[in-house]
Image: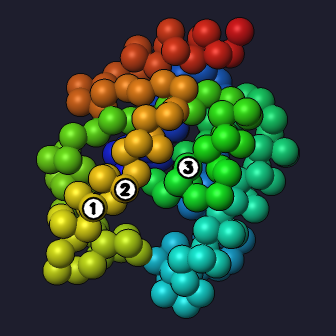
Amino acid sequence: MPGAGKSYWAEQIAAAFNLNCIDLDDMISVRTGHTINGFFERFGETSFRELEQQTLVQIMEVFPSGTVIACGGGTPCFHDNLAKMKQSGTVVYLDTPMETLMEHLENEAEQRPLLSKEDWPLDMEELLKKRKDIYEQANVVLPAKNLSIGDFTSVLNDSLL
């Protein structure tokens, strides 16, 4: 979900395990010269999701191992991205309480393309309802409240062996 801390934890995991770290949204922004929000506004969600899948597949081909990819909240929910991600490595879902998501996005909701300015808390609840079943298909579900790098250690040590 937006605000779950995917980018933060990807960087922490990569540093702790001496792995590469790639943020999918950052890669798309660099490739297109647009912010994610700007790309959504100009080209729409369908074009974004197609580009997102292409970029994800290219990253997984170039970095078949030894890389942590911070995906956008919608990445596993479109096309066959989740299946591709699971074939390529360990997928972790950061199960973040709605209150925490709201706190994290309080000052940046307008920068998120799927959140409206006025009703963004309702938008968040709807997004979670739509996506939770997909998220829970991840290889690992970690409760994000009070999460520490140690919570990733046994999960990732097993998958890196």
Tell me: 13 left or right of 62: left
Q: Position of residue 61 (x, y in %)?
A: 84, 45
Residue drawn at x 27%, y 78% is 116
Q: Are marks 1 and 2 in contact (CB under 8 Å)?
A: yes
Image quadrant containing the C terminus: top right
- The local crowd at label 3, few if under 14, some if 14 to 19, many if 20 or more residues have their Cα within 10 Å, is many
User: Compared with residue 160, is residue 126 higher up or lower down, i.e. above or below?
Assistant: below
Point out the residue furthest to the right here: 62
Give the residue pinned by disc 1: 126
Tell me: 132 left or right of 99: right
Q: Nearer the viewer, residue 47 or 71?
A: 47
Q: Position of residue 58 (x, y in %)?
A: 80, 54
| Quarter holding residue 82 | top right
Amino acid carrying mark 2 in the image: Lys
Q: Nearer the viewer, residue 78 or 37?
A: 78
User: Compared with residue 43, is residue 152 higher up or lower down, i.e. above or below?
Assistant: above
User: Compared with residue 16, is residue 58 higher up or lower down, i.e. above or below?
Assistant: below
Give the residue pinned by disc 2: 130
Give the residue pinned by disc 3: 76
Name the secondary structure under disc 3. helix
Circle count: 3
Q: Position of residue 28 (x, y in %)?
A: 64, 66
Q: Position of residue 110 (x, y in %)?
A: 29, 76
Q: Nearer the viewer, residue 2 or 7?
A: 2
